[in-house]
């Protein structure tokens, strides 16, 4: 092969690393532009031009990180994030922390100055190696590329491909069942970019046979509703729900006898519902669990967990996912007198009572169901269920020939149509409009707790960043989910239910570069003018109204319509339930922001 006159070691190294990651299954690369990372960015652009990967450009690294997080959440495969050196790297920390605690695969590739420029006051230089150390599954500070590889077979390229193999395996949790973030720090010397090598994108057959790929990731739970004796595992995220359970995992046998309930937290997956069905046990499923369906589902679970005759008599709890939405659930899982088994998933292990037993899989022993126990929960569940269906029109009165009856019925109908939307009506409308081919993401706002308290069961794909339950990055995460679920012509749309402060916290995510394909997404903003979640906390009983408003409530009067216009989003304002229902069922072809004004 002829020598390339403008070749650069940085470009050949970037080609070897990114090319190998694409071979291993990476399909999305999120780029935050910068000078030191230009070789990586240009290689990514070439891979996109060849149809090997999709590139998403985001000017804000925090937005880039959460966009990649959303991709990993939906697909079960890591996206790559590329950025330059300095504070750019630090801005990836929030997404890395969420990925760590929630068990979402993520690949962080950060460009850096060479070692001789570190610690000497060089521009845009800080200590990047180890920046994510407590949270990553694997990290390395790679050597500075120092050779041009004309054939793609040099020692440097081979080393980088081996690093890519190790990084992919670690991100997917191979050997540990703990998927999560990986950090590759990549120092480059000038020239920072050069002519692309002709071998970019060509398969490396000699390495591919031994390389760990997606099938080496920890297995997700079986989604089917099997009989007693079936194996149920944790970690059933949206993107992995169709993967079979691992036959090599030794299950823990759940004997009959103890009064048992199944608790499904964030990212629990369908395995929680399947186990509850097989064991004949009540199912307490958070709205963000992906398990809130089936005949064993408990409605109004917070009240029932606080009931001494129900929650107070629980002897054993089987936990899937990460429960975070109720104090009653936390209190139950913290009790020393309750035997807790936490089924390992991709996220952080659960052990609130300091005596929880972690298991890789569970199996319900064949035997008689405790019908008295199950029946008591189901009777209480039916009594606690909330019917949010709008009242049906009084057909007889509307058809009456008595003027007073007919006018009264018409007035009642007009009152219903004109009634302002409250939080319950908002989440109910979104829930009813969402179907299995859609995606639903709840922000860590007050609305997710309202939804968790009131909504009935429905088997729809639900996401939420509950690893740390922060309000940052919600819109970016939703965009990542939409881009992935709608790739290759996938149906449906993504809905993000968000509060006004969470919207403003991630407003930069509204920016989508010209030329990139617009996903179908609705961001439904419940705007109550501030952080009203504090109104329901103990602090509201002791703090003055002035202090609450100043340092907790965070009042705001941002013009959301102008914000939408500035970023090129279609804007809809819904003031009644009818208007909201119409907005939710109307065809969506791109980005839409729906504002719903709520009372404090």
Image (tube, grey):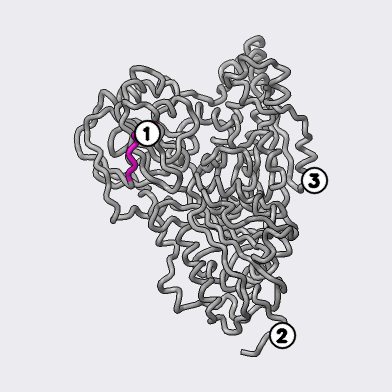
Residue for point 62% across, 79% down? 147
What element does badge 3 sit on? helix
Mark earlier in primary sequence (1, 3): 1
Q: Residues within 10 Å of mark 3 (few under 14, many from 20)?
A: few
Distance between mark 2 and mark 3 Cα atoms: 45 Å
**Residue receiving disc 1:** 354
Q: Where is residue 170 in the image (x, y as percent from the top left)?
A: 46, 58
* Highlighted range, magenta: 353-359
Of residues 402 and 281, the one nearer the viewer is 281
What element does badge 1 sit on? loop
**Residue receiving disc 3:** 566
What element does badge 2 sit on? loop
**Residue receiving disc 2:** 5
Q: Which of marks 1 and 2 is in front?
A: 1
Asked whether residue 473 appears in the rendered view, the answer is yes
Q: Residues at badges 1 and 2 in contact (C-beta under 8 Å)?
A: no
Q: Position of residue 84 (x, y in %)?
A: 68, 60
Q: How crowded is mark 1: few (under 14 residues within 10 Å), some or many (20 or more)?
A: few
Quarter of the C terminus within the rendering? top right
Name the residue furthest left.
Answer: 367
* Location of residue 531 (image quadrant): top right
Distance between mark 1 and mark 3 Cα atoms: 50 Å
Residue for point 39% across, 27% down? 332
Residue for point 24% across, 28% down? 370
Q: Which of marks 2 and 3 is in front?
A: 2
Q: Position of residue 92 (x, y in %)?
A: 62, 51
Q: Residues within 10 Å of mark 2 (few under 14, many from 20)?
A: few
Q: Position of residue 460 (x, y in %)?
A: 49, 42
Mark earlier in primary sequence (1, 2): 2
Asked whether residue 489 appears in the rendered view, the answer is no
Mark earlier in primary sequence (2, 3): 2
């Amino acid at each position: 092969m002829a020598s390339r006159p403008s070749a650069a070691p940085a470009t050949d190294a970037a080609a070897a690393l990114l090319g190998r990651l694409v071979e291993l299954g990476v399909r999305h690369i999120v780029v935050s532009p910068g000078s030191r990372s230009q070789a990586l960015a240009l290689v990514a652009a070439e891979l996109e031009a060849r149809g090997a990967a999709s590139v998403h450009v985001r000017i804000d690294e925090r937005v880039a990180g959460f966009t990649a997080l959303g991709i990993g959440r939906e697909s079960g495969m890591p996206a790559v994030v590329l950025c330059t050196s300095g504070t750019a790297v630090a801005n990836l920390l929030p997404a890395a922390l969420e990925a760590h605690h929630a068990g979402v695969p993520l690949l962080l590739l950060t460009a850096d100055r060479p070692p001789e420029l570190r610690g000497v006051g060089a521009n845009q230089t800080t200590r990047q190696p180890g920046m994510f150390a407590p949270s990553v599954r694997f990290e390395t500070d790679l050597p500075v590329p120092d050779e041009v590889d004309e054939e793609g077979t040099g020692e440097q390229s081979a080393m980088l491909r081996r690093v890519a193999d190790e990084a992919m395996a670690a991100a997917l949790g191979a050997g540990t069942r703990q998927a999560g973030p990986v950090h590759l720090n990549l120092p480059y010397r000038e020239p920072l970019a050069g002519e692309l090598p002709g071998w970019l994108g060509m398969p490396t057959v000699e390495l591919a046979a031994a390389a760990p790929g997606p099938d080496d990731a920890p297995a997700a739970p079986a989604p089917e509703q099997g009989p007693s004796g079936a194996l149920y595992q944790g970690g059933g995220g949206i993107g992995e729900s169709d993967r079979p359970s691992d036959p090599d995992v030794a299950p823990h046998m759940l004997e009959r006898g103890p009064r048992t309930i199944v608790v499904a937290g964030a990212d629990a997956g369908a395995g929680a519902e399947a186990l509850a069905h097989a064991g004949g046990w009540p199912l307490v499923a958070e709205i963000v669990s992906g398990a809130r369906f089936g005949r064993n589902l408990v409605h109004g679970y917070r009240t029932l967990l606080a009931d001494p005759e129900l929650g107070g008599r629980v002897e054993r709890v089987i936990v899937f996912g990460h429960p975070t939405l109720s104090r009653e659930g936390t209190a139950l899982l913290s009790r020393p007198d309750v035997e807790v088994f936490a089924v390992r998933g991709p996220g952080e292990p659960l052990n609130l009572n300091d005596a929880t037993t972690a298991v890789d899989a569970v199996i319900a022993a064949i035997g008689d169901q405790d019908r008295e126990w199950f029946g008591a929960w189901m009777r209480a569940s039916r009594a606690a269920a909330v019917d949010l269906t709008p009242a049906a029109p009084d057909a007889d009165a509307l058809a009456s020939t008595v003027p007073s009856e007919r006018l009264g019925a018409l007035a009642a109908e007009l009152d219903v149509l004109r009634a302002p939307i409250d939080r319950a009506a908002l989440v109910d409308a979104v829930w009813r409009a969402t179907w299995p081919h859609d995606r639903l993401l709840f922000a860590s706002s007050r609305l997710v707790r309202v939804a968790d308290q009131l909504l009935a069961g429905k088997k729809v794909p639900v996401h939420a960043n509950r690893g740390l339950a922060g309000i940052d990055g919600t819109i970016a995460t939703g965009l990542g989910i939409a881009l992935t679920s709608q790739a290759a012509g996938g149906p449906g749309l993504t809905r993000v239910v968000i509060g006004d402060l969470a919207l403003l916290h991630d407003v930069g995510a509204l920016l989508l570069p010209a030329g990139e394909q617009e996903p179908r997404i609705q961001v439904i903003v419940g705007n109550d003018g501030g952080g009203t979640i504090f109104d329901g906390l103990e602090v509201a009983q002791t703090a003055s109204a002035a202090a609450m408003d100043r340092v907790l409530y965070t009042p705001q009067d941002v013009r959301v319509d102008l914000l939408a216009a500035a970023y090129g989003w279609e804007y809809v304002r819904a003031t009644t339930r009818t208007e909201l229902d119409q907005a939710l069922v109307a065809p969506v072809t791109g980005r839409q922001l729906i504002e719903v004004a709520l009372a404090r």
